[in-house]
Image (cartoon, helix red, strand yellow):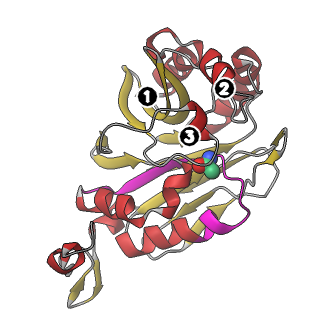
Amino acid sequence: MKVSIIQFAPVFGDVTKTLDKLSPLLDQASGSDLIVLPELANSGYNFKGSDQAFELSEIPEASVFIERLHRFCKTSDCHVVTGFNERSGDNIYNSSFLINQSGITGSYRKLHLFNNEKNYFTPGDRAPEIYSINGVKVGMLICFDWIFPEIWRALAIKGADVVCHPSNLVIPGKAQKATPVHAMVNRYFVITANRIGTEGDLTFTGNSLIAGPDGEVISSGTTSGEEILSAGIDVSRARDKMVTPKNDVLKDRRPEFYQAGSGL
Ligand code: ACM
């Protein structure tokens, strides 16, 4: 399976200009089975307030951004995961969508909101699910979810081979250390697609990465370059959970002791 990340900077509040930027990058990444874009790729991140965050949200079914990605998936026989400022009634969610030739086939609403996101977004209201891409089991998490190992383990237990992780990371180096470790301890692949650029007082840290089941970083980006990172991944490696002939990282768990009195 060939996977790619498009590390770029959306144009804040201008979905048309963002698509002008993104379209040639999508064309360059075509030939991939799966392309992952950063968090909130349709709107940008650093909103002035909740009114602006709402104004820049889109209803997925009426979104020019989703429509363009859907068209790309149809012509390139590809899957795309993208972060998306999603409007649903009076609420907005920091979401991720999986798009294929038929349109949106999977979604996730960020469970753990970061800092000022709590002023704008409604927290995710459902557990992350696993979706199939030609038999490969794919889960989605978003950015600050990186600091909650429970949710990464939950996806492993649900059978994820690959976790797509659209991000707008602002704290240098921390998530980029953690997500290869999540890959290692769960023995799956992680695709952290971070953005670059500055919006107001926030600078995004790039260094997108693809990590494998031994915790190895297969491909990594620079801190500020617009880049496409690609890798061929052998998904069968994520189905082997053995770390020694006698240790299976999922079957050796002792959840009865984690749960007792812990609130887990
Ligand atoms: C983040 O969750 N965007 C840091």
- The residue lying at 55 percent from left, 16 percent from top is 58
Task: Kindly give the residue lying farthest to the left in the view shown.
Answer: 256
State the extent of the magenta-drawn residues as a range: 159-177
- The residue lying at 55 percent from left, 53 percent from top is 144
Q: Amino acid at mark 3?
A: Lys
Residue that carries the numbered disc 2 in the rendered image: 43
- The residue lying at 81 percent from left, 43 percent from top is 197
Quarter occupied by residue 14: top right
> Left of 116 or right of it: where is 21?
right
Tell me if residue 19 comes above or below residue 187 in the rendering: above
User: Within 10 angstroms of label 1, few (less than 14), some, or many (20 or more) residues?
Assistant: many
Task: Kindly give the residue lying farthest to the top in the view shown.
Answer: 62
Q: CA gap, disc 1 to disc 2?
A: 18 Å
Residue that carries the numbered disc 3 in the rendered image: 118
Residue that carries the numbered disc 1 in the rendered image: 99
Q: Amino acid at mark 2?
A: Ser
Query: Could you tell me residue 218's position as x and y percent?
Result: 58, 66
Query: Could you tell me residue 69's position as x and y percent?
Result: 54, 23
